[in-house]
Amino acid sequence: MKRYTIFVITENFIGILNRITIIFTRRGINIDALTASESRLQGIHRITIEVTVNEDTVIQLVNQIEKIIDVIKAFYHEDTAVVYQELALYKIPVSRLDSGLEKIIREHNAKIIAAEPDFIVLELTGHKEKTQELLEILKGYGLLEFARSGRVAVAKRMLTIDSFVK
Amino acid sequence: MKDMMRGADIVVRSLIAEQADLIFGYPGGAIMPVYDALYDYHEQIKHVLTRHEQGAIHAAQGYARVSGRVGVCLATSGPGATNLITGLADAQIDSTPLVCITGQVAAHLLGTDAFQETDVVGISMPGTKWNIQVRTVEEIAPAIAKGFYIARSGRPGPVLIDITKNAQVDFGEFNYSPCLGFRSYKTHHPIEKTIIQEAAELINKAERPYLLFGQGVVLGKAESELKFFLDKSGIPAASTLLGSGALPQEHPNYVGKLGMHGNYAPNLLTNQCDVLIAVGMRFDDRVTGDLKRYAKQAKVIHLELDPAEINKNVRAHVAVQGDCRESLSMITEAIQAKSHPEWMAKFRELEELERSSVVQHDITPTKTGLTMGEVIHQINQYKADDAVLVTDVGQHQMIAWRYFNYKKPRTQITSGGLGTMGFALPAALGAQLYDYSRQVICVVGDGGIQMTIQELGTIMQTKAPVKIVLLNNNYLGMVRQWQQMFFDKRYSFTELDNPDFVKLADAYGIKAQKVSDRADLKEAVEDMLIHDGPFFLEVVVEKEDNVFPMIATGCSVEEVRLS
């Protein structure tokens, strides 16, 4: 079993996401993370799905996703074939601010993106291992809330979606 | 001067533009505007009122299967739409082209749990090739055009179009243009010459080549191409459940039927061939048995339109993705003319074994009770060459399939992938209404017929001359057989107390007869087939008759048993 990133390029119609996710549910496969938003081309959506399965399964998943009428193309990639980032936000109470925390923020290259009377919000971009590491540390600082995005990824190979969207 | 009309009229005019001339349905509140519009177009489009929406959709399936056209059905919102789900799932898995139009509550009521409101689009998503909810009158015609295009192209399948009531009553311009394609859906896949060469080389070198054909040949209209390929290559060919009829059974290369209750030789010899050519079939588990022990010794060539089917169950050494009509004729050109008499003789030898140990007892039994097989055997003697066989699900389905003499394509109508009991009666009605002059023989069991028996009312109203043969053993036969073989004969809830079926058919004004003695069978079958109008023939058959050969679940194709 390996972690795969699946890219799906679709028309921007209601219900497409549902059609895609039921392909995973029917096989009892859990989606690790999912990101969806408009692609570079207007009216075309790009969905990034992370899943941990073996290669035979991911090939079948991609084939069945491509079968969906309003899906234009689907690809799968191993971790080494994509360039990706994840975003994490951490909400810390102001009462826990001290020089130790300041050092941690600097060492991990986190940014303070919000400062309110009661709390601050830190942002960290990177791979899961990095955001996870900071999470473990900040749990000891009275972490109030934590949110992590799925992957935003681009493939390493030189292929644009234009060739599929005619 | 714009052609302005109600959305409901646009619906009917769009169906007519798509050449739908016969549709099935059941009215209700949310679809009433469309039914009102239908009232004005009865010259151009005929509607058949069934007795349940499930009857409507199965009838549309029967119509589509026999004609090759897109089946159409209409239903209202809420329970009307949910009653279609079984038929949608059935059409989806058996690749039958259908367009189902459901009424829906007015757009401003969506999501409020209004009367007869359900999320049909959500519920039907896994069971449809495509679906859409139309909320404005302008969207109606494009949605119907797209729906028909999707239903009939590529690998056919069912689509559902949910139309809100406000869209049906609003006025809009009727400006119909058929859908000719769109960017996210590729229906034609060009076949690479190098792949054809690879396949041809394998076939030329093969000593024991074997061809399996399925419904893809029928859907692709590739019956002649298959025949020419077999004539030139000399390769033995066997059929899946839904492939029957694609090759006439008298063809010298035809060796029988595949799968759990297919013929002995075709199953056994799968594990002895060296090249396996699969055409328009998807290696369903009923055909393959245990995949770990299925044709592992062979090089597999898979001629298949749907890329998701290639390498799904069985690894293809040469995957020829595309329309089998094209690929078959390209391969026929590339191969050498050959014959394989010794290999073919192996099939015939085992056929003889099956004949003496199973077939003989099925179709010409000596015991007192009537067997299902002998009834089918009698039907074969009197039926027309192009008679259509529609079966329900269970033992009778397997026996009828084994013994019916299929001579023409599109004469085999049964619920294969989903195995829906209750499919046959409405499907036979749909098939018959496509062509009143064709013989449509509907073979059912006492369990299955009662699931959709209300459609006798539709047969009565339309006077469709369907020939219904009820093989009555007062049991859910297939389940009982499994309980006998694998559950120590613990017949848990499989015995049925049945009504007087003849009286029931009579109540529906349908000529009926009951036969329980061998002496009466021949004449009853003959009478039924020449009768002008619908006929209900109940045949009382042996209570504990079993279907063999059989490949039990988890077994390999070479473990096919004769008893």
Image (tube, helix red, strand yellow):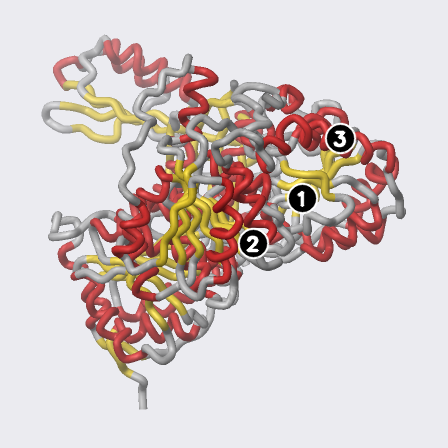
Q: Secondary structure at mark 3?
A: strand
Marking on residue B389: none
Q: Chain of mark 3?
A: B
Q: Residue B88: percent from the left, percent from the top?
A: 38, 48
- Give the residue at x 66% y 46%: B321
Residue sitting nearer the eye, A89 or B326: B326
Amino acid type, residue under disc 1 in the picture:
Val
Q: Secondary structure at mark 2?
A: loop
**A121 shown above or below B152:** above
Residue sitting nearer the eye, B376 or B321: B376
Q: Residue B169: percent from the left, percent from the top?
A: 20, 71
- Give the residue at x 78% y 46%: B252
Cα distance between the residues tagged 2 and 1: 19 Å
Q: Chain of mark 2?
A: B
First in sequence: mark 1 vs mark 3: 1
Marking on residue B279: 1
Q: Which residue is mark 2?
A: B411
Q: Residue B422: percent from the left, percent from the top?
A: 36, 44
Q: Chain of mark 1?
A: B
Amino acid type, residue under disc 2 in the picture:
Thr
Q: Nearer the viewer, mark 1 or mark 3?
A: 1
- Give the residue at x 31% y 85%: B3
**B174 shown above or below B310:** below
Q: Which residue is mark 3?
A: B299
Q: Using the rendered image, report if marks 2 and 1 lie on a common chain.
A: yes
